[in-house]
Image (cartoon, rainbow, N blue to C red):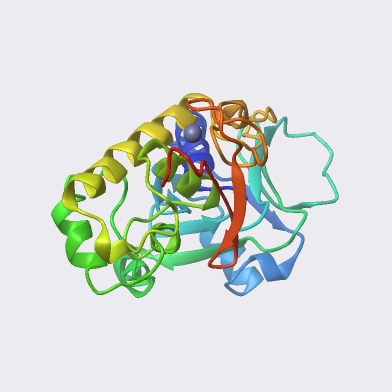
Amino acid sequence: MPELVEVETAKRDLSKIIENKRINKVEVFLDKIVYNKKQEFIKTIENQKILKVKRRGKWLLFELDNNYLIIHFRMEGRFYLLPLDASKDKHDYVIFYFDRFSLHYNDPRLFGKMEVISKDNIFKFFEDKNLGLEYDDKNLTSKYLKDKFKTHHTAIKKLLLDQSFITGIGNIYADEILFESKINPKTFADKIGKNKLQEIIENTKIVFERSLKYKGTYPNIDGKRGTFEKYLKVHKRENEPCYECGTLIKKEKIGGRGTYYCPNCQK
Ligand SMILES: [Zn+2]
């Protein structure tokens, strides 16, 4: 599933290519991907310039002249760039045409969403989503997490996946962050001290930055898959030896999600 890193990678790659370029034409091949009425969606976007590509949580935002186009990849959505005359894949559902290339939105699982929102409503849109802080927000401190977690007698793994505390952490990253922090994923969040919370914050940055370096685990706009999977220390490594102590990595369901951890390093 595309997570924060994949969305941030798309943001960084796309911003170099599509910022300050005009969308000449849009084609929508499947209505359900687009939240607005199809004709209204097309009319609002065509002939608009993309001023800036942004990200908030796992949403990708194109700031247009008068509106925002927001995109959520959900299970398997992604963008890729092609020449103007390239043929369409059967899972390409929206195509944006620029002067010299086209941007295809591909989504085999059909869960992704696009919506045009006026600039006046964008603040409310994200306020309603109740998103927590970004991983690199300076307000993300051990005090913030201590206050948030003190009323939650719940496994820390579940709270890291809850987007209302820190936004953008998905299943792969929660496992890796807890391994780096030497915290058992079942530890009750309200019992974790400030020092350990600080380690969670620092390791969230470290794990995200490391993954960004390898462009995540998904195909990116050039069609090449990010290679971060090779560097995962616990996630998807069930019964393989821990790189730090040799103990076999364990898999367990926590909050309905497959969770990987080292039973020795993460007591
Ligand atoms: Zn270990």
In the displayed structure image, the side of residue 260 where residue 205 appears, left or right = left
Q: Position of residue 136 (x, y in %)?
A: 28, 42
In the displayed structure image, the side of residue 81 where residue 265 appears, left or right = left
Q: Position of residue 102 (x, y in %)?
A: 67, 38
- Using the image as rendered, state which of residue 220 and residue 203 is in the foreground: 203
Q: Position of residue 257 (x, y in %)?
A: 59, 61
User: From the viewer's perspective, is residue 3 above or below residue 256?
Assistant: above
Q: Quadrant of residue 53?
A: top left
Q: What's the residue at 54%, 41% (across, down)?
A: 6
Q: What's the residue at 44%, 54% (across, down)?
A: 185
- Using the image as rendered, state which of residue 37 and residue 14 is in the foreground: 14
Q: Position of residue 254 (x, y in %)?
A: 54, 63
Residue 53 visible in rendering: no
- Using the image as rendered, state which of residue 3 and residue 108 is in the foreground: 3
Q: What's the residue at 73%, 34% (across, down)?
A: 84
- Using the image as rendered, state which of residue 200 and residue 70 is in the foreground: 200
